[in-house]
Image (cartoon, rainbow, N blue to C red):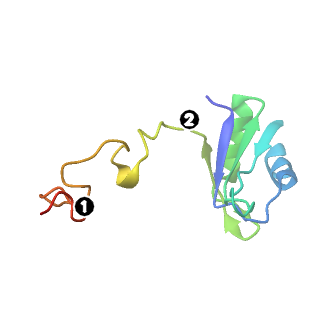
Amino acid sequence: MNTQIYIGNLSFNATEQDLRDLFGAHGEVTAVFIPTDRESGRPRGFAFVTMATPEATTAAIEALNGQDCQGRPLVVNEAKPQQPSGGGGFRGNGGGGRRNDGGYGRRDGGGYNRNRR
């Protein structure tokens, strides 16, 4: 079992110390990560906590999932590895290259005045 825990529905006011205190009651906390928005610097409403042992991870998940924290019911479960996105691009078309319909469902190739005479 992974020892990293995902915490969702987290209050934007929650601090690293708040999470260390909350999860520390169930075992040793080795790391806390609260992601922030790149532009505003504000917390994004979720976090990751790493516990020292799988037993502590299980105990924390069972005890804290659904528990109220700063007025919000927490979503607590085992963190899953991030899946590769499969490319980016506009509207998930994988980026790069051109589609025959110009990307907008047109049969004529789309675009504006492209090769029209």
Q: Position of residue 39 (x, y in %)?
A: 69, 61
Identified at 49% across, 37% down, the residue is 83
Residue assigned mark 1? 111
Asked whether residue 102 is in view, the answer is yes
- Give amino acid for label 1: Gly
Q: In this image, 69 relative to 94: left or right?
A: right
Tell me the CA gap for discs 2 and 1.
Answer: 40 Å
Q: Secondary structure at mark 1?
A: loop
| Residue 27 seen | no
The answer to which image quadrant residue 49 occupies is top right
Tag 2 residue:
81
Q: Is residue 106 above or below residue 62?
A: below
Q: Secondary structure at mark 2?
A: loop
Question: Where's residue 9, x and y in %?
Answer: 64, 61
Q: Foreground mark, 2 or 1?
A: 1
84 relative to 93, above or below: above
Q: Quadrant of the C terminus?
A: bottom left
Residue type marked 2: Pro
Crowd tier of the residue under label 1, counting other residues whose Cα lies within 10 Å: few below 14, some 14–19, many 20 or above:
few
Q: Quick check: 4 left or right of 94?
A: right
Q: Residue at x 73, y 59 (%)?
A: 43
